[in-house]
Amino acid sequence: MNVVITGSTKGIGLGLAREFLKLGHDVVVSSRGSAAVEKALAGLRAEFPGRKVVGKVCDVADYAQVQGLWEAAVAGLGSVDIWVNNAGRDGIKVPFFMLPPDDYVKTINTNVIGLMNCNRVAIPAMYQQGSGMIWNMEGFGSNGSVRPTLAAYGTSKYAVAYLTKALAKELGKSPVSVGYLSPGIVITDLLVPPPERRNRDWERSKKILNILADTVETVTPFLVAGMLAGHGRNGAAVRWLTNGKVRRRFFMSIFRRRDVFGPLGL
């Protein structure tokens, strides 16, 4: 299959690209920075010399750039079978009334407007080619959970869930499908604060994260396998950290201590 992944030059997005390539699929990687795209492109091509890997700079908040991403994918791969909306940002973690307006605008532009742009571009194009599936990435807040200092991010992810549900109803039995993708809590630069902001609150958070968080290398094989198995099933959901898994993790933490940060020097 031919796969487009937004925000895929690092973290979960890059991990997803690697997993698709390992399984014999071709990918398009993208992000806002040209240097990041070139670095990811060179690394993936060297690691998977037998596969097609296309790179394209794209700010998902810019509709024209998203259209350009689709066109680059078709030019490089011929068609798009799977489009993964992974690009996102979480912003500064402070109470909302202290948040600079520019920061929450950037979060909404990337996580909501960007998501809308990608679906708006991909759906008609997939209709035209006769098939395709879009996977929208959930996050904290998608299920209505609320946490202080995550007002803008949580709001944006609640919007992801609503938009995906609405699109699934609109697409119905069409040749285009949409699904939910949830990685749970993954150790990326969105989760780990820079060294100067690792205070007592961070040390307290690490205790919970060591129970619930996972690495990119652990989560992405599950997500890719789920997307391939659920391909074409409108409204399908691939979720790593289910309620049952959360309960088991807390129960097992009584007997066994996990340290997901140790190998990373954190």
Image (cartoon, helix red, strand yellow):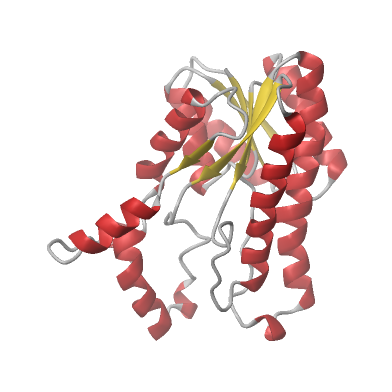
Q: Looking at the image, is 114 positioned above or below residue 254? A: above
Front residue of 2 and 250: 250
Residue in the image at 55% along x and 23% along y: 231
- Is 58 placed left or right of 222 in the picture? right
Count of marks overlaid on the render: 0
Residue lying farthest left? 255
The image quadrant of residue 212 is bottom left
Please name the residue shown 82% across and 40% down the image: 65
* Residue 29 x, y percent position in the rendering: 62, 34
For residue 224, side relative to residue 168 (left or right): left
Is residue 78 visible to us here?
yes
Q: Quadrant of the N terminus?
A: top right
Residue 13 position within the rendered picture, expressed as x and y whole percent measured from the top left: 54, 42
Q: Does 152 sit above or below residue 49?
A: below
Seen from the viewer's position, the closer of residues 28 and 85 is 85
Rendered location of residue 52, percent (x, y): 58, 18
Mark yes or no: residue 57 visible. no
Against 166, is 83 above or below? above
Assign the C terminus to one quadrant of the image. Answer: bottom left
Is 136 or 186 nearer to us in this picture? 136
Q: Point out residue 197 in the picture as x, y percentages from the top left corner.
A: 49, 79
| Residue at the image position 37 percent from the left and 50 percent from the top | 215
Residue at the spot 50% in from the left edge and 60% down from the top edge: 189
